[in-house]
Image: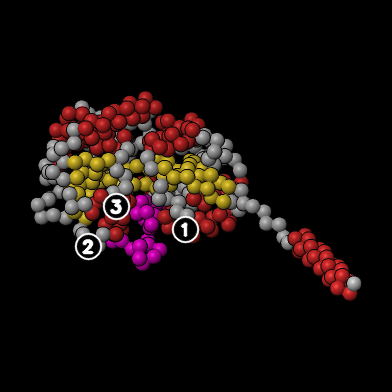
Amino acid sequence: MTLAKDLKVLLCSLSTAILILEASSTSLAANKPIVKEKPPVHILSWWGYLEKDDPQLAAISDRCGANLAVDEFYSNMEFERRYTSEPNKYDIIIYQETNRGILGSRIESNDFPIATSNDYAPTIKRQFDQRKYLANTKLFQISLTGLLWEENPSVNVTKKSTIGEVFKQFRNQTIAILDDYAEAAHFFKILLIDQKTEKGIKEISFPNKNDVKAILGDNHVVFANDIDQLVKDPKFGLAYTWSGSAMFIRTNNPTKKFQFLVHPDLSYASADLISLLKKNSPAKCVADALASRSFLGVLSTNTKYFSPYGQVASVNEKLSDSNFSALQEEFFTPNANFSWLGDLSLNNHRTLQTSWLELKTFLAVSRP
């Protein structure tokens, strides 16, 4: 009986303790502050612009009270596919200007403007004003195309070299060309006609496939936007690429001497734009921040593309690059007169896309 009585007392004590713990937990939960979850701001962007570990993005997230949900794309064709398949998903898009001809009527609006001062560099401001963007669209980053090769005593490429003369110096090597139908069409057209197109390219087309094959000769052609690994191949000869990619490669391959040339007949400037698509406070706050001078200045030192606000100094000694500084000087000089790759008509887009896929297949099948 004594044992039974002791067990009964013990069980009562345990029950009392459990009730006390449950009451305490309930009280703590009631007093715990409720943390409101940040609403997502969905962004569709070119790869490499909005990195997850970028402290600038973390600061924007905190300031705007939003979680930045970033989807990346790697080509203009992928951008069109992803945007058109989910047109209501994205609050902000960062895309190449050539796509205005496809999406302009669905993208641009004066109803929800991005609040920036538009105090762009004078040469950029002229281009911006000529294009008559609506209020929700601003410039994001700008690039020049050009030629990249590893320094070699047998190669002599200058601004006075014709495009034909340039290619005759590369044989049985790997030639990299931007994997984009608008960029590549311009390249091949200039390559074959060997003269500058009209300022402000509007209608471009691919030349005859056999003519392209003839001038490329025994070179192996690779279509790629990311050539970081390709340039390490012993067979690498020449790349037609964006200035940011070229500056990155020169900086990150100190044991090799890569040259990058902005060619007066072949090179042109192209702009990436940022558009705000929805009228809500968190998205507008984020778009304002992403289009600001401060954000784009720091981004420019990382990507080696140009900020529309003008030249930027490195914010980090490790990112200092005399090559990029010289290129900025050339691009932002008041009398600079670069051709600009603008938006293309919808019909031109569709024709180029079809011809581009046909040409890539033809060159792959007939590879030396």
Q: CA distance from mark 1 to mark 2?
A: 28 Å
Decide: is 160 above or below 88: below
Q: Earlier in the sequence, mark 1 or mark 2?
A: 1
Q: Position of residue 247 (x, y in %)?
A: 29, 54
Which quadrant holds residue 110?
top right
Identify which residue is drawn at 41% across, 45% down: 46
Q: Position of residue 51 (x, y in %)?
A: 45, 54
| Residue 270 visible in rendering | yes
Q: Which mark is residue 37?
A: none
Decide: is 362 above or below 273: above
From the image, which quarter does the N terminus lie in?
A: bottom right
Q: In this image, 297 relative to 252: left or right?
A: right
* Kind of residue at disc 2: Thr
Q: Earlier in the sequence, mark 3 or mark 2?
A: 3
From the image, which quarter does the C terminus lie in?
A: top left
**Circle 3 residues within 10 Å: few <14, some 14–19, many ≥20:** some
| Colour convention of the picture | secondary structure
| Helix, strand or loop at mark 1 | loop
Identify which residue is drawn at 45% across, 51% down: 50
Q: Which residue is mark 3?
A: 228
Q: Which mark is residue 53?
A: 1
Q: Earlier in the sequence, mark 1 or mark 3?
A: 1
* Residue bounds of the magenta highlight: 300-322
**Circle 2 residues within 10 Å: few <14, some 14–19, many ≥20:** few
Q: Position of residue 141 (x, y in %)?
A: 40, 48
